[in-house]
């Protein structure tokens, strides 16, 4: 199978080398791994250049965007900059962050899963983060059928059907909901253990956290589902402030009549899917 990787890197000199090494150590290499140097002011570009010199798989793109780390628009803008230089002939595309270490059989396993599942749409493993004792422990606060945005693989048919990735907070939730809406399956494999080198959400500002609630509004959750989802998120991360920030973001989006990310039919499906998920967990 032909697959391509887009790695978005903003000031990632601390972790990027380990990420690129894990890509080049794959048992089945990508056709190309495009690394987008997104307005970095550290040695990120130098690391990319070094790897690109040593391997034809690594390709660099320089991209200028805001220096502010705002989840959603910034990273997806960088992703599309990388996607623009990738050939249209591929079996699956991968969005990868620059602070992870993949197991050597990662994409070999992804290929096996795609071949054995005709409706495969989005695929990935689970994230592990180092605790205070240096042990790698599972940190996957979402449902086990969710693939973290840091390492998502999309089959071409699925990526086309969902219209690509939304340039907004919540892109890595709405993509899976739309994939299911279009009849594709989201597949996770617990045997694929990815090391996430930067703790989840460690660089998010308070302003960014408001975007969680705004995203739920734009996905047409409605208030009750937003409140339940925000409560779950706050509990998982042990931060009460996340709940309040998210609810505030929802009401601000409602007051401003912010545009939706999905149409009314997709929104109806999303609400039904979410409520069914809640009922299945309760009963």
Image: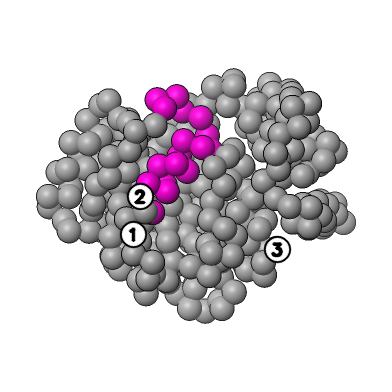
Mark 3 or 1: in front is: 1
Give the alpha-carbon distance from disc 2 to disc 1, as whole Å. Answer: 7 Å
Residue with the mark numbered 3 = 181
Give the alpha-carbon distance from disc 2 to disc 3, as whole Å. Answer: 27 Å
Q: Position of residue 237 (x, y in %)?
A: 63, 32
Give the alpha-carbon distance from disc 3 to disc 1, as whole Å. Answer: 27 Å
Q: Position of residue 108 (x, y in %)?
A: 38, 69
Main SS of the magenta part reads helix
Q: Is residue 41 above or below residue 80?
A: above
- Whether pointer 2 and pointer 1 mark residues with C-beta atoms closer than 8 Å, the reply is yes
- The span shown in magenta is 66-83
Mark 2 or 3: in front is: 2
Q: Position of residue 122 (x, y in %)?
A: 54, 62
Residue with the mark numbered 1 = 86
Report if residue 139 is visible in the image: no
Q: Is residue 41 left or right of residue 153?
A: left
- Look at the numbered disc 2 and give the secondary structure of its residue: helix
Residue with the mark numbered 2 = 82
Q: Position of residue 97 (x, y in %)?
A: 40, 44
Q: Residue at x 30, y 30 (%)?
A: 40
Residue 9: which quarter of the image?
Answer: top left
């Amino acid at each position: 199978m032909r697959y391509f990787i887009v790695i978005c890197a903003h000031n990632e000199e601390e972790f990027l080398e380990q990420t690129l090494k894990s890509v080049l150590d794959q048992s089945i290499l990508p056709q190309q791994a495009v690394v987008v140097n997104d307005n970095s002011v550290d040695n990120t570009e130098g690391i990319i250049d070094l790897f690109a010199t040593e391997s034809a798989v690594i390709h660099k793109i320089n991209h200028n965007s805001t220096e502010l780390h705002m989840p959603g628009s910034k990273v997806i803008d960088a992703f599309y900059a990388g996607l623009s230089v990738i050939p249209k002939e591929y079996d699956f595309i991968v969005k990868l962050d620059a602070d992870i270490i993949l197991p050597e059989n990662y994409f070999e396993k992804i290929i096996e899963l795609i071949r054995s599942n005709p409706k495969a749409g989005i695929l990935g493993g689970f994230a592990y983060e180092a605790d205070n004792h240096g042990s790698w422990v599972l940190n996957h606060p979402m449902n086990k059928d969710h693939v973290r945005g840091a390492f998502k693989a999309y089959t071409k048919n699925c990526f086309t059907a969902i219209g690509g990735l939304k340039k907004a907070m919540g892109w890595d939730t709405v993509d899976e909901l739309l994939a299911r809406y279009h009849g594709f399956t989201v597949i996770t494999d617990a045997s694929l253990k990815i090391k996430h080198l930067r703790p989840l959400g460690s660089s998010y500002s308070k302003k960014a956290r408001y975007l969680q609630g705004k995203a739920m509004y734009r996905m047409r959750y409605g208030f009750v589902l937003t409140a339940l989802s925000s409560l779950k998120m706050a509990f998982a991360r042990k931060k009460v402030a996340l709940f309040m920030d998210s609810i505030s973001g929802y009401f601000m989006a409602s007051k401003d009549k912010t545009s939706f990310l999905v149409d009314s039919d997709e929104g109806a499906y999303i609400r039904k899917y979410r409520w069914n998920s809640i009922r299945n967990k309760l009963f």
